[in-house]
Image: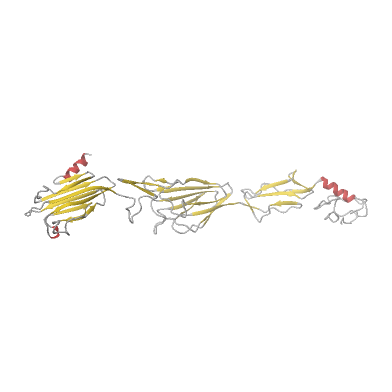
Amino acid sequence: MRVFLLSLLVRFGCGAELQLEMYGSLESPNFPDPYPTDTKQNWTLSVPDGFRITLFFSHFDLEPSYLCEYDFVKVEADGEALAFFCGREETDTEAVPAQRVITSPRNSLTVQFVSDFSNEERFSGFVAHYSAVDIDECSERGDEEPLCDHFCHNFIGGYYCSCRYGYQLHTDNHTCRVDCSGAVFRERSGILSSVNFPGPYPKSSDCWYRIELEAGFRVHMNFDPRFDVESHPDISCPYDHLKIQAGSREFGPFCGDRSPGIIRTDSNIVSIRFHSDDSGENLGWSLSYTATGSQCPVPEALPNAVMVPIQSEYSFKDHVVFSCQPGFLLVQDGGTSDRLQLECQADGSWSGRPPRCDITSRWQQRLLSAVWKSGPDSAVSPSKPVPLPVFFQLTESKGGLKRGQLAGMEEHQNGSEVGA
């Protein structure tokens, strides 16, 4: 603080004045009497941030000269000359301020008055008035980058930024960012994209996405052709970039306008990181992913069995269900049931062996009754026993077995064949 006060004294001593009020007036020395000769006087006007200074001369009467080389008033801001005045209002209309209002570009302004060695005509000098005016930062940017990403709100002496719903104001108080980390996708297919795709993605954000599938699946990704991430012509993705980690493999970084296309991984877990810096208006990216599982062999067709669904190929987590045709019982590993479901496993094998379909005892009895039945339409004579098994694909109808339904039976002892 002592150093600051000392610097003020050094800067504004010897004919210099510091004006800190929000408004006021300046007068040449001795006004309204003639100003003294060989005089140099400076006024430094300063107002708070968020304001500009306007300066208006209500009276101006200085010695006229070519290019104002004798007596003059100079107005500066940040070392840049804004105005240079001299002469009398009645005769030197081009050199005097007249009705001109001078506005500082920022919150400070310097006014300098200089007189030479003579004032024979007793010029009276000048009177000027200044005031602080609010800067509308939100609407005075012109071609410059907006102060706020989303919304700008002006108030007297300053402004503040706000963001659309779902966004957060960055610590720089200008940038709108999103909390886009921690999203986990566990479905076997889905779509991921940068926030607001295909609109400009948020600045100053780090987004983490994670795909977690059951072991045995592999993640395949397909990027949308519309890919637009800020890039650099000479350096690989120094600003915004997309990186993908799948197991021990890393894909990327990706940026620019060329889509990564199709990426096939050998992992069931994939991490995706998207980083954006504090500039740019690029449109982002989108991808769809699917789960691909290990392939299992197509089960063989079994006699008298029904298998659903029938597909050209089976992969991890696919199911098949076996059942038997009427008159047959499903048998596997010494047990029986009405149906059996097998699942394709992560290692490419089925969860069990296919079953077999055996004829039921009720159908065996009906078969024997049909075979030993006497009469002119009997299939065989009761004096000629038929060895078992003698059945293949039997179907039931009213009144017993239809003629012609016993096929593939073994021959009789005398070499004859049981037929229709």
Q: In the displayed structure, does residue 66 sit left or right of residue 385?
A: left
Q: Position of residue 288 (x, y in %)?
A: 53, 53
Q: In the displayed structure, does residue 168 sit left or right of residue 269?
A: left
Between 264 and 151, the one lying in front of the other is 151
Q: Residue furthest top?
A: 2
Q: Residue furthest left?
A: 120
Q: Quadrant of the C terminus?
A: bottom right
Q: Quadrant of the N terminus?
A: top left
Coloring scheme used: secondary structure
Between 372 and 141, the one lying in front of the other is 141
Q: Position of residue 339 (x, y in %)?
A: 72, 46
Q: In the displayed structure, does residue 327 sit left or right of residue 25?
A: right
Between 330 and 82, the one lying in front of the other is 82
Q: Residue furthest front?
A: 90
Q: Position of residue 348 (x, y in %)?
A: 63, 50
Q: Position of residue 335 (x, y in %)?
A: 74, 43
Tally the numbered discs. Answer: 0
